[in-house]
Amino acid sequence: MNGNADIIMELENLCYTYEDGTEALKGIDLQIRRGEKLAIMGANGSGKSTLFLTLNGIHKPTRGKLLFNGRPVEYSRKGLLDLRKKVGIVFQDPDSQLFSASVVQEISFGILNLGVPEKEAAKRVEEVMEELNILLFRNKPTHFLSGGQKKRVSIADILVMDPEMIILDEPAAALDPKHARMIDGIIDKLSEKGITVILSTHDVDRALKWADRVVLLEDGIVIREAKPDAVFQEEEVLMRTNLEKPAVLKLFETLCRAGILNENLKIPHTVQELEQYINNR
Ligand SMILES: Nc1ncnc2c1ncn2[C@@H]1O[C@H](COP(=O)(O)OP(=O)(O)OP(=O)(O)O)[C@@H](O)[C@H]1O
């Protein structure tokens, strides 16, 4: 491994222009730390999906550099295979990812394609199915699954490859609160394993609670990157990205203004933390 071992991925002046001339990424500089929980946020069309497709080599940057574990990504067949083994994307719409006849075939496909011996692959598939609570519907055709089940299978597809980084494009979109919480639990487990997790979301409360760092994109450039506490207090950048201040922060500020809470308290990240402040007065 070259360079700083704490940095898993580095983007240097990364640009991507689509064939029709749309400049979707206009020079992104970003260092992603190993094991980091990174939320990428921005208005519709700001370039989040394009960025994700560039991070795992589906799009080749039109300018600039992408380094993985300190080395420039090689856009050869082998270079891309190596990158995609280590950096997986869970797409927002599971139907664009799932195509095999049954769940177990779906999860086995990628790992067998990598050339992992059948017995070893089968063992790994069983482990991942157990971990993500998939065993009960292992033989169902993927197109008969519910949205929450499809999402779990999409994550299993990636997890089975033993990745270093997982990118999730709006993982809670179209899920009910119970299933969204289940996916949150799975994402926490990925982080506990040391996997670097990048996700896009429009949910500021969730990002405040979850992320180590928030990156705000506007029109293909990064306009702010910092800890969520700092980013979510900046009304001007939030407005530029069509985001609102998290509800828990708004309430905290109202309670401070009313003299009910002391404004020197650490910013609460969850409703539970805010309740505790109120109960401890
Ligand atoms: N295949 C394509 N060809 C041409 N332009 C594209 C293509 N895909 C995306 N774009 C354009 O690139 C820009 C960035 O789009 P992208 O999908 O990356 O944004 P996004 O932030 O993921 O949006 P959303 O939140 O709506 O998913 C937009 O102007 C979009 O119209």
Image (tube, rainbow, N blue to C red):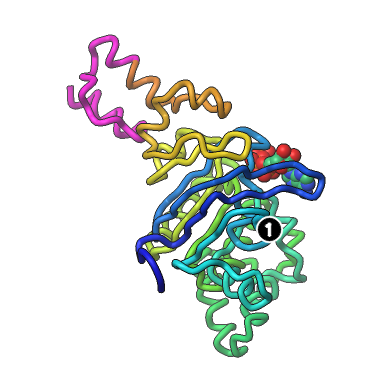
At mark 1, the secondary structure is: loop
Decide: is 8 above or below 40: below
Q: Quadrant of residue 277?
A: top left
Image quarter where ligand 1 lies: top right
Percent across and percent down for residue 130 are 51, 70
Is 265 placed left or right of 79 in the picture? left
> What kind of residue is marked 1?
His
The residue drawn where x is 42% and y is 25% is 234
Q: Residues within 10 Å of mark 1 (few under 14, many from 20)?
A: some
- In the image, the segment drawn in magenta is 254-281
Percent across and percent down for residue 77 are 68, 76
Front one among 54 and 259? 54
The residue drawn where x is 45% and y is 53% is 185
Residue at the far left in the pictured view: 281
Decide: is 193 above or below 218: below
Front one among 252 and 22? 22
**Which quarter of the rendering shows the N terminus?**
bottom left
Kindly identify which residue carries mark 1.
Answer: 59
